[in-house]
Image (cartoon, rainbow, N blue to C red):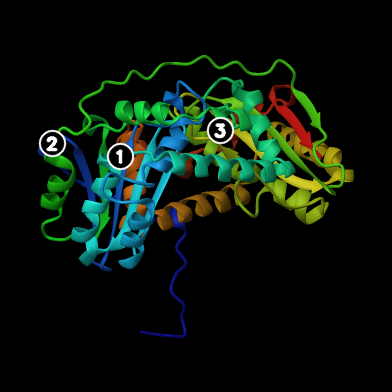
Amino acid sequence: MNRTTPPPIKDAVEFDLKLKPYEQYTLDNGIPVYVVKSDEQETLQLELVFPAGTWYESESLEAAATNFLLKNGTSKRTALEINESIDYHGAYLNRNAYHETAVYTLHCLTKHAEVLLPVLQDVILDPVFPEEELNLYKQNHKQKLAVNLQKCDFVANRFIDKYLFGEFHPYGRVSSMMAYDALQTETLKAFYQKHYTYNNCRIFVAGHMPANMIELLNKSFGATKWNGETHLTRLDLPIQPAEEKKFRIFNDENGVQGAIRMARQFPNRYHPDFPKMLVLNTILGGYFGSRLMSNIREEKGYTYGIHSQLYNFRQSSAINIQTEAGRDVCEAAIEEVYKELKKLQDEVVPAEELDLVRNYMIGSILGDLDGAFQLIQRWKNLILNDLDENYFYNNIQTIKTISAEELQHLAKQYFSPGDFYELVVI
């Protein structure tokens, strides 16, 4: 081997990406379990997913409050005892409620799984929603909301979603002091009984599993038909966007920065244009070398950072461009955004820039496939959206083969200035 000769450089797009398959099991009561195994480290991630997000609310904030308070007391353990049991074993129990789903995620050492699963079982199967915990939840979140409402970026995020989807739609609904005050224990218990049931549960496991992992899961979650059986209907709720498109809101008279949001609706991930738009969005503002960053940050110096993103909501999606800039340059920054949108409509993307973006996107996906925890997240997103590995491979193919002419056509279709909601909060 001649060590004075460097090895050939291989672009990321030349890699043949493979999505490692998962293993599937079924507990005795029918709960599906999806597993990606890894023996690299003695760690384990266990996630329980329920259709219990804001989409299913009959009263504002009940999904998030129910999800949060599951962990704050059972008939056998107080909130303190639950947290001490988790902390003592160096583990972490996280919970989140999203638009469509609510999750509980346990991270722990493999050797502690047998001890911690009964604690998680207690949290999921036997919450009591103590009145004092609900009162504390209300107090803390109202204080947090009061602080956040003084921040222009927080206010901008609330308003842009409301303009895009309507204030009564789950994607546009926001928290309020009145909604926190209206939360009642009985309401949360009813939401829990309807949505946190055995037949609505799906379990995702990644990492180094104990040899008897399925037996342990059966003992904790598969032995009974806990909470009974409910069949939820996912309603197709109407989107009612704002009629006006331009908004200027004064929020902090002493502030020196303004929060800018420019957004428009876009078809969801099932539409053939969605994977193509992921490429175009990356060129526009999806990574540090994007056009928006190069112009508005590097050249003009209007902001420390600007980026665009594509929402991954189930019913609908949206393109959202966001940044914070000095009050005196907010309008100028908006004009520069429109210039970049028009440039993508009028000119094809140079081959060198498109190749750079292809390599960046494939490289990012390579990183997302590195390890069992990342792999199970990729599979979870596919499974929960009723997709399979073909969707993954089709997206890879789109990144590798989409032409500059296709991107220009896409920009002409979706980057018209009149389609964008424009918001500045100062």
What's the residue at 24%, 47% (across, down)? 121
> Could you say where residue 273 lies in the image, as x and y percent from the top left?
50, 28
State which quarter of the image contains the C terminus: top right
Report the residue marked by disc 1.
389
Residue 73 seen in this snapshot: yes
Q: Is residue 271 left or right of residue 217?
A: right
> Could you say where residue 17 lies in the image, as x and y percent from the top left?
35, 52
What's the residue at 35%, 61% (across, down)? 84
Mark seen at residue 224: 2
Q: Are marks 3 and 1 in contact (CB under 8 Å)?
A: no
Q: Are marks 1 and 2 in contact (CB under 8 Å)?
A: no
What's the residue at 60%, 15% (across, down)? 240
What's the residue at 62%, 45% (across, down)? 144
What is the three-letter code of the residue carrying label 1?
A: Glu
First-in-chain label (1 vs 2): 2
Residue 81, quarter of picture: bottom left
Report the residue marked by disc 3.
180
14 or 376, which lies in front?
Answer: 376
SS assignment at label 1: helix
Q: Nearer the viewer, mark 2 or mark 3?
A: 3
Q: How far apart in space, not on screen, are marks 3 and 1 (Cα)?
A: 41 Å
Q: How far apart in space, not on screen, are marks 1 and 2 (Cα)?
A: 32 Å
364 or 316, which lies in front?
Answer: 316
